């Protein structure tokens, strides 16, 4: 089980909710739902999740990696200069059916390019 989802279209106005990536680079096990931006664990086990996001034009960006509505890790891209990147990684023990996603908590918009700067990755170890 492993996935990587990427945003290849920037947004200057996104300011709430789940980060939904428009491109799925890989989705082994089909646990990632591209439409909702949510990973659902197909098997119990230990999983690693990584997020990298680039803030839009010095507007700042803060995201949480969320497990079943509970934030578990946070990333922050400072608004002190344009195109700052925030990253974080978390190891979570999941039960079958647990849901993990990336949720907005601060700032406005995100930047990316055709080869994405904003990604959400997860895999079972």
Image (cartoon, rainbow, N blue to C red):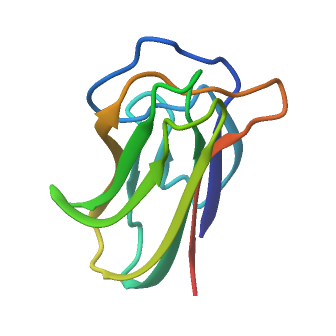
Quadrant of the snapshot with the C terminus = bottom right
Q: Residue furthest front?
A: 80
Identify the residue at image location x=41%, y=67%: 42
Q: Please, is residue 106 above or below residue 88 in the view?
A: above
Looking at the rendered image, the quarter that the N terminus falls into is bottom right
Specify the farthest residue to the left: 69
**Residue at image coords 49%, 49%:** 32
Camera-nearest residue between 116 and 93: 116
Closest to the observer, 119 or 78: 78
The one nearer the camera, 17 or 24, is: 17
Q: Residue 57 appears at what percent x and percent y? A: 59, 21
Rendered image quadrant of residue 24? top right
- In the image, residue 29 lies at what x, y percent? 58, 61
How many numbered marks are there?
0
x, y (%) of residue 102?
Answer: 38, 48
Determine whether 116 is above or below 74 in the image: above
Seen from the viewer's position, the closer of residues 77 and 115 is 77
Residue name at image x 65 percent, y 52 percent = 4
Among the 4 quarters of the image, the one containing residue 37: top left
**Is 62 placed above or below 39 here?**
above
User: Along the horizontal axis of the image, is 117 left or right of 45?
Assistant: right
x, y percent for residue 108: 39, 23
């Amino acid at each position: 089980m492993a996935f990587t989802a990427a945003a290849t279209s920037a947004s200057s106005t996104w300011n709430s909710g789940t980060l939904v990536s428009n491109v799925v680079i890989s989705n082994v096990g089909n646990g990632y739902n591209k439409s909702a931006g949510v990973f659902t664990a197909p098997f119990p086990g230990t999983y690693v999740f990584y997020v990298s996001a680039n803030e839009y034009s010095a507007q700042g960006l803060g995201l949480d990696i969320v497990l079943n509505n509970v934030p578990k890790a946070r990333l922050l891209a400072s608004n002190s200069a344009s195109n700052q990147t925030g990253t974080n990684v978390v190891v979570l023990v999941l039960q079958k059916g647990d849901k993990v996603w990336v949720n907005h908590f601060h700032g406005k918009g995100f930047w990316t390019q055709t080869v994405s700067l904003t990604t959400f990755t997860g895999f079972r170890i």
